[in-house]
């Protein structure tokens, strides 16, 4: 073996080791004040120490409040949450981690707040909060976005006069097999269910077309259990989490439990935000803004939740948080404190344990990991 070959092999092994010991993190922000934030930032999480590197600007953008990464790890998609003419942008992820804008397409709605990509990497779906609609955009082979091919407007209202005068689609999630799309609509207290027509790049109402939540609940974010048998939605307005049994053949959600996210003696105002299931399927987490905490639950074999703890250390307005793929760490985005915190996850109990590691990021509201 030549010296040159040995050197190349050593570099390859070093790169493999680095990727195994760390993971890239992309951070979406609000850019109302460009002195505080200018767009999408990137950092690196050390999986041994739990330390985050100092964030650097990956791409300037207007209110990239929610991000999603393509399954092949080569592209990133971001909403532009602004005004009546919302948009979604496609970026190529460069070798150095920077983002190169490929193109931008309209979201065909106001205030897009959530974006997702199907597992085949052929479609982007967007939830438009302001107008209460869901939109589908095909992905071209080069990662750029084609114009929207389908947009569905929700109808209705809820009993909360301040927040539910009309529909407000707050998230869009896909079933593990890409057959169904679930759009949690805060304004009408429903999780809308659509069949995903891959050939026509369309959303088709399911039968039944929705799962009904309690009036005034305000469903916000939705997630599946890794086993695929259960799903969960966090309800922003009444501060609860609803557990569902999921039928993968019909797409039907059947409620099995609803639990509160706050201490029984809490008297202040609060709204819920993010929800996540641990990769091992044993724990669930939901965030409180007002109480400023992440609520932790265990999940039993029937999909039901049992409360464990409220983690509050240094947390302020946790609009978003995420669990890195190995399940060792949870990163919490403090929107109003302009920080991202790192917690270690207790593998036996699910408890969040403060590491003391944090970085400054202005108005951070979304965390995404680039899987090695």
Image (spheres, grey):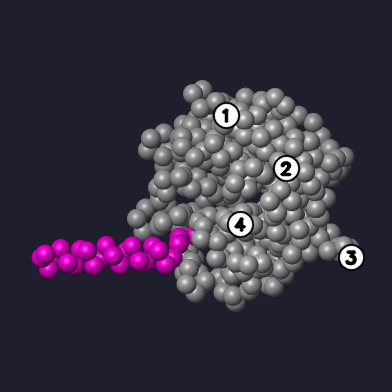
Q: Residue furthest left?
A: 2
- C-alpha gap between disc 3 and disc 2: 27 Å
On screen, residue 320 above or below 206 = below
State the separation of the CA atoms marked 4 and 2: 17 Å
Q: Mark 3–mark 4 contact, CB under 8 Å?
A: no
Question: Which quadrant of the view contains residue 95?
Answer: bottom left
Comparing labels 2 and 1, the label whose residue is closer to the camera: 2
Image point 61% across, 57% down: which residue?
Answer: 278
Badge 4 or badge 1: first in the primary sequence: 1
The crowd level at tag 1 (other Cα within 10 Å; few <14, some 14-19, many 20+) is many
**Residue drawn at the location 12% of the way across and 68% of the way down:** 3
Going from N to C along the chain, the mark reached first, 2 or 1, is 1
Q: Position of residue 333 (x, y in %)?
A: 62, 62
> What is the C-alpha distance between the residues marked 4 and 1?
26 Å
Residue at which label 1 appears: 196
Q: Is residue 226 in view?
A: yes
Is there a contact, CB below 8 Å, between mark 4 and mark 2? no
The secondary element bearing badge 2 is classed as strand
Residue in view at x 45 percent, y 45 percent: 71
Residue marked by disc 4: 278
Q: Which mark, residue 265?
A: 3
Q: Is residue 218 left or right of residue 53?
A: right
Magenta-drawn segment? 1-27
Residue situated in front as seen by the camera: 51 or 255: 255
Look at the numbered discs 2 and 1 and tell me whether their residues touch, using CB distance below 8 Å. Answer: no
Dot 3: within a 10 Å radius of its alpha carbon, few (fewer than 14), some, or many (20 or more) residues? few
The earlier-in-sequence mark between 4 and 2 is 2
Q: CA distance from mark 3 to mark 4?
A: 28 Å
Q: Position of residue 286 (x, y in %)?
A: 70, 57
The quadrant the N terminus occupies is: bottom left
Q: Which residue is mark 2?
A: 244
Q: Mark 3 vs mark 2: which is more N-terminal?
A: 2
């Amino acid at each position: 073996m030549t010296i040159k070959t040995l050197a190349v092999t050593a570099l390859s092994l070093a790169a493999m080791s680095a990727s195994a010991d760390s993971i890239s993190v992309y951070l979406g922000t609000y850019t109302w004040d460009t002195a505080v934030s200018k767009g999408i930032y990137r950092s690196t999480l050390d999986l041994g120490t739990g330390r985050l590197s100092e964030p650097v600007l990956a791409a300037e953008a207007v209110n990239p409040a929610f991000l999603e990464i393509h399954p092949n790890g080569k592209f990133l998609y971001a909403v532009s949450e602004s005004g009546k003419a919302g948009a979604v942008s496609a970026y190529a992820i460069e070798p150095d981690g920077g983002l190169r804008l490929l193109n931008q397409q309209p979201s065909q709605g106001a205030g897009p707040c959530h974006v997702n990509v199907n597992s085949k990497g052929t479609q982007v779906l967007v939830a438009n909060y302001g107008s209460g609609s869901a939109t589908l955009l095909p992905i071209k082979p080069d990662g750029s976005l084609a114009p929207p091919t389908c947009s569905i407007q929700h109808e209705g209202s809820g009993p909360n006069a301040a927040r539910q005068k009309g529909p407000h689609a707050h998230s869009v999630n896909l079933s593990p097999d890409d057959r169904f799309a679930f759009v949690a609509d805060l304004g009408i207290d429903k999780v809308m269910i659509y069949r995903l027509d891959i050939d026509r790049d369309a959303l088709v109402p399911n039968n039944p077309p929705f799962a009904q939540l309690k009036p005034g609940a305000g469903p916000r974010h939705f997630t599946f259990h890794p086993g695929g048998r259960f799903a969960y939605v966090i309800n922003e307005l009444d501060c609860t989490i609803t557990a569902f049994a999921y039928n993968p053949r019909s797409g039907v959600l059947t409620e099995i439990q609803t639990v509160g996210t706050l201490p029984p003696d809490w008297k202040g105002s609060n709204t819920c935000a993010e929800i996540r299931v641990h990769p091992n399927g044993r724990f669930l987490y939901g965030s409180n803004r007002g109480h400023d905490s992440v609520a932790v639950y265990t999940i039993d074999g029937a999909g039901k939740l049992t409360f464990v703890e409220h983690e509050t250390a240094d947390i302020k307005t946790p609009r978003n948080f995420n669990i890195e793929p190995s399940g060792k760490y949870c990163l919490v985005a403090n929107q109003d404190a302009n920080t991202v915190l790192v917690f270690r996850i207790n593998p036996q109990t699910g408890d969040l344990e403060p590491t003391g590691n944090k970085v400054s990021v202005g108005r951070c509201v979304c965390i995404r990991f680039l899987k090695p």
